[in-house]
Image: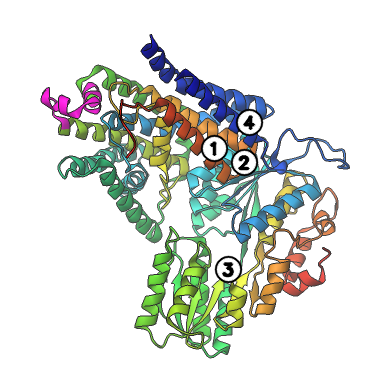
Amino acid sequence: MKKKILAILLAAMLALGALSACGSPATDPSAPPSEGSEPEAEAHKIGVIFYGRDDALGSCVYEEVNHAAEVIGVEVEWALGDYDTAAQLTSAENLVSAGCEGIMFMPIEDASAQRVGQYCEENGVWFAICFRDILDQDIKAYVEGCEYYVGSCWEDDAGAAEEMVAVLAENGRTTYGLEKLNPSIALAVRNDGYAAGAEANGGEIVAEYEVPNDGNSQTHINGITNFLNLYPDMDAILMTTASQGAAEAIMNTLKQNTTSEQIQVVTFDLYEGIAEDFESGWVAAAAAGNSPDALFVFLMLANSVEGTPLSDSFINLSQKEIIVTSAEECADFEKYIDNPDFQIYSDDIIRSLNGKFNSEVSLEDFTELMEAFSLDWVKENSVQ
Amino acid sequence: MKRLDKGLLKNLAPYAGLIAITLIFALTTGGRFTQARNLTNIIGQSMVTMIAACGCTFVMAHNNLDFSLGGGCALISAASFLVTRGENLPLTLLMCMVFGVLCSLVTALIHVKGRIPAFMAGMCIMFVGRGVVEGLATNMVMNLPAAATAYANNMVYLAFLVVVFALSVFVFNYTKVGKAQKLIGANPRAAELSGIAVGRYKAIAFAISGLTLGIASFLTMIRIGSVTKTIGSGLETDVLIALTLGGIPLAGGTDTRMRSALIGSLTYYVLGNGLMIWGLDANVISIVKGVIFLATVYVTMERREGSYAL
């Protein structure tokens, strides 16, 4: 028995020791500087709290931020996989303990923005928010009043939704079913955008079902089946999210029960096989391409951490989304934007947005680049 | 002598585990793990789990699991908020304790009177609680006054922990309530035949678990400053893993020790903190935690002669 216990303890310790070597280079505290790197004073460190890096958006954000950090000589420490406020606050505490001077995070809910922000404020740590606006006005006012709040960035989801409904209307489709997001989450502005788009284009949302919190595919299947059975005049589905298997469940249900002549889909986010669905007419438009959001927030935050803030006050940036409307655009999108191995912005551009390399960097430099963001711009400026 | 050694090793294993991982992280993180602020954070983060685990130990001692903790925390927090709007913190705390006891008594009632396994009854509460709070959070904002979060500091948490742990140790080791739990866990039939009202004592254990859950819910509320639809997420698994890492016998009984709540919770949060400082992915962290959890169960689990897995 003694031997067994010792063997298990030893195995666990060895496993821990071995796994420690698997840590990301960007986060290894003891890693020596790479050859050829500029001799610098101790690099500033920024913590990033993000939901994960396993899906398309997460993997792009992870690579873009790590790459930018390397280019501008900042250290990054990641906290991945937190899905509630308490967990995000715990990660913020751990990151600050680990020496991070700035925290970038995507708040899982408004309360998280407040508590993480409050913690950073109390500890004199800069913080910035990516991919989310704050819905609760009291919390928003609190966060915007924080001295260490650098700013945020979010997408014009409502505008993208309206634009996609316009594409459907051009195709003669005006009777819609809505895959609705829970109104309490920030992304629910997509519901509103679809509603506004329907109204503006003489269409009507005749039915809806709510996206399940746990991503249960059966909820999507039941919702779509009900649409098809109860609303024979319905000619399009407005999808607010394709993630967590929603797109696969919805598209498979549609393909098994109807035709693309009867129903077309518009969606946020791309999914596996969407190019084929564009070709066969199932999909009319898809909004995606928001990963630079985190890159710009990270660079904005780095400037504040390094003592060259872009503004004396907080900054709200807006990230454009790309509306993909064909299989060809889809292929380009997957090659140039939805590709963690491809850097959208060159090292020179990244450096030009950092006060250490460009003492004249300004907020306008950021907004101009963000305004110019499009599939064509990325293709034209591709250097890889 | 051999039996004594076995028991001693089993008792020492949780301490050895905690010391081992602490040393590993202290030696491999370039001093970041041992920074005072980091150690303070770990202790602060673990105290809510410790408090919930103290009550849960009573339930595990009589060989049951309370799976209602996460959903219960959500339900308790929301119900308390609806009564007090979070404006009167002592009253909110009181309401949390009252709703905590009520919530757990429902679990106990379903289990004892309905003869339904406690973990299934707990899961019912978990789902109901989560559903109710998600519905509420969709339709209303449940923010506590900004001043409430000022109380979310380690000294306040420590004061609660000291009181809860001291009372738990006393009740568990020196009163009939605690002794009955261990006897029921060791042999429920024998306990019944010796005149112990098994159902009643089980209900008392759940009530105590509910009381500590109420306190943990209150502390969670002031920590996050709001009642959100994710409040208390994963609390049941956090507590179960913490108690297991602390060496609690999974079948309950006389070897159950209240210290498991403290040692295990600390081990759990040290692990999470150290692995994050190492920079491991969330997925790898989960795998490492799983391996260590399994190893702990293997070492501490009591196996009876001739028993086999079903």
- Cβ–Cβ under 8 Å for marks 2 and 1: yes
Q: Report the side of B237 relative to A63 (left or right).
A: left
* Quarter occupied by the C terminus of chain A: bottom right
* Type of amino acid under label 4: Gly
Precedes in sequence: disc 4 or disc 3: 4
Q: Report the side of B2 relative to B121 (left or right).
A: right
Dot 1, how many residues are within 10 Å of its Cα: few (below 14), some (14-19), or many (20+)?
Answer: many
Q: CA distance from mark 3 to mark 1?
A: 31 Å
| Whole-percent x, y for residue A85 in the image | 49, 47
Q: Which mark is residue A83?
A: none
* Type of amino acid under label 1: Val
Give the labeled residue for mark 3: A271
- Cβ–Cβ under 8 Å for marks 3 and 1: no
Dot 4, how many residues are within 10 Å of its Cα: few (below 14), some (14-19), or many (20+)?
Answer: some
User: Which of the 4 image quadrants contains residue A25?
Assistant: top right
Q: Would you place residue B82 above or below residue A366 in this image?
A: above
| Whole-percent x, y for residue B289 in the image | 51, 37
- Cβ–Cβ under 8 Å for marks 2 and 3: no
- Cβ–Cβ under 8 Å for marks 2 and 4: no
Give the labeled residue for mark 2: B280
Circles 3 and 1 on the same subunit: no
For residue A194, say whether it is visible.
yes
Residue closer to the observer: A375 or A43? A375
Give the labeled residue for mark 4: A17
Q: CA distance from mark 2 to mark 1?
A: 10 Å
